[in-house]
Amino acid sequence: MIQISDLHKSYTMGSNSLHVLKGLNLEIDEGEFVSIMGSSGSGKSTLLNILGILDDYDQGTYHLGGKLIQGLNETRAALTRNEMIGFIFQSFNLISFKNAMENVALPLYYQKVSRKKRNLIALEYLDRLGLKEWAHHLPNEMSGGQKQRVAIARALISKPKIILADEPTGALDSTTSFEVMDILKEINDQGKTVIIVTHEHDIAAMTKKIIRLKDGVIEEVIKNGELQLFKDRIRTE
Amino acid sequence: MFDVDVWQEIFSTIKKNKLRTFLTGFSVAWGIFMLMILLGSGNGLQNGVKEQFADNSVNIMWMWTGETTLPYHGLKEGRPIKFKNDDYTYLTEKSEDLEQVSSRFYLPGNIMYTYKNEYGSFETSSCHPALLEMEKVNIVAGRFINDMDITDFRKVIVIGDNIKKALFKDEDPMGKYIKLNNVPFKVVGLCFDKKRQNERTAYIPVSTAQRIFNGADRVHTFAVTTKMVKTTEEAEAITERVRQSMALRHNFDPKDTRAMGSFNMLAEYIRTMKIFQAIKIFVWIIGIGTLIAGIVGVSNIMLILVKERTREIGIRKALGATPASVIGLVLLESVLITTVAGYTGLVIGVSIMEGINYILEQMLASGGADGMFFRNPTVDFTTAVASTLILVISGAIAGYLPARKAATVKPIEALRDE
């Protein structure tokens, strides 16, 4: 699903150049449930932006679903994002003056689906996440968990190849966090590739593979079998 | 682009910023309002002056004769110059600059009009049929003098409304005979002039007038219409050519304005209209200047709006909004504000001018607006369409910079958690 080889990215800040990703190699298969961890400055946000086609890279290659993602213009990038990627953000990023249903339906608007049809589909997705009664409520009338579920529905509605979640539980209490993780797990069980960026160990431990970044390269990949070990290690830390 | 969603979004942002939207819209509305008032006033002045020209064809020219004041070809000054019927023939047949000609023979002395026991003294205008169009005689019953009247020396007369009232009271004058100094003339037509200028005038065939009142082939004045030309120079050249040909026929110096006097309306008309064209351009410049102030205001507000909506735009872009759709969103909002506000200004401005026009018409109908230099101060359809176009275009201009800024919003930066 995702093949990244020798990825480089640096930012120029005034006269200083900051080399963030230094020849990163990464492969994620279809249907994986992956978390990306790393301390701040490790390059995880940069990697997420590149994965989400929100930012370009300097060197190397990035294939998404077999397609090379490189040097796209803004319009192409927007269309590819809409088609391939579902985003979930820490702060939900719902549009405040649109109700839940309209927020969920937004990606379909950019696919030029008719209003009636996309609202119907949006209701269906909200129903799946147990929010049917909240369809006509504005975001500020909902709790954090509900808002994140709306955001998840929005990420799913365009049937993307991968779900990219940036600290999806960062703004939630632990009970709600686990609920959200359960939903993401369920989505993954249905065969969707889910990638989470997080710095919380217990959240990362709920995924099937953990990629730890350090200084712009992958320091460690912990897979299924070793996960139990990782969990034990967190407890002792 | 014209999806309900776009409008829903525009309205929700407008609703959130009512005062700001109002103030922004007000500047545009004010601009258009001023433009309408200025243009309307300009038109009113122009129409008022046009109205002064409206009594006659704008291309009318009068010629009359007097005594020479300059010696010419060995002939002394002080000779009387007289037009004759063959001058009429010459002007109608030979002169290429003229379209229509009517000669006039002044009836001698005071002509007494009598019908039964009623009598009175009125202005008598002897003429050719062409005068109908030249002096815009308004026939309300019967007909005007025609060619047969001229060739057959018919004793027919067309009378003004005042003459009819004085002589006939409530009686129908058509077909009745009026005596002019004891010569009976049959009434064939009735004319009415709402400006009450020619109502004490009666028209008779010039040939009949010459025969009955011992005029022989004498003509006192000519009224002619010249070719419609575009410039004062051309109009004056026509006057000059006509003068020269008449000078040649009657042996006087063409520069001698006392031997033959002339007045070419068209030259005056073109001169006046040029002044108004200049005024109009001036008015447009001021109006558009006011409008530009409004546009800058809208553009400014839209820039602030885009800044405030950076996050929302970032979300949209992450979800697949193309730069074009983001530009469309901002541009459409600005076009909407300017169009709605501008249209309001347009309607108010036009309404006020129409109101003034209504009052003016009322005054005119009651006869209280004689010599008014301000008429019909309204804006025509073309101007209204042009203004609407200006509005939409200015909305687009006002939205362009902010829209471009919005399109360059980077989702990463917009969505970064502070």
Image: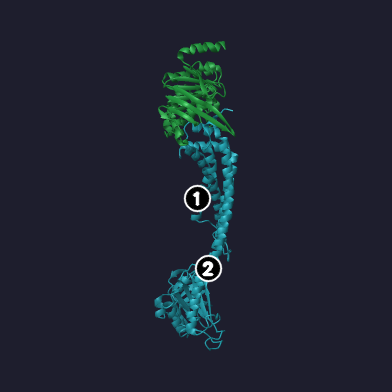
Residue type at tag 2: Tyr
* Residue at (44, 22) in percent of width and height: A28
- Answer with mark 1 or mark 2, whichever residue precedes in sequence: 2
Q: In the image, residue A48 lies at what x, y percent? A: 50, 26
SS for callout 2: helix
Q: Chain of mark 1?
A: B
Front residue of this view, candidates A235 and B388: A235
Mark 1 → mark 2, Cα distance in angstroms: 32 Å
Residue type at tag 1: Leu
Q: Chain of mark 2?
A: B
Front residue of this view, candidates B304 and A38: A38
As drawn, the label of residue B203 is none
Query: Chain A drawn in what color?
Result: green
B187 lies left or right of A96: left
Q: Is residue B251 above or below residue A7?
A: below
Front residue of this view, candidates A33 and A1: A1
SS for callout 1: helix
Residue, disc 1: B389
Query: Chain B drawn in what color?
Result: cyan
Residue, disc 2: B269
* Residue at (53, 57) in percent of width and height: B378
Q: How many marks?
A: 2
Circle 1 residues within 10 Å: few <14, some 14–19, many ≥20? few
Q: In the image, residue B5 lies at what x, y percent? A: 48, 36
Give the mark toward the camera: 1 or 2. 1
Image color mode: by chain
Is residue B171 shown to the viewer in this render?
A: no
Q: In the image, residue A69 lies at what x, y percent? A: 44, 31
Task: Give the quadrant of the C terminus of chain A.
Answer: top right
The image quadrant of residue B157 is bottom left
B101 lies left or right of B290: left
Is residue B250 shown to the viewer in this render?
A: yes
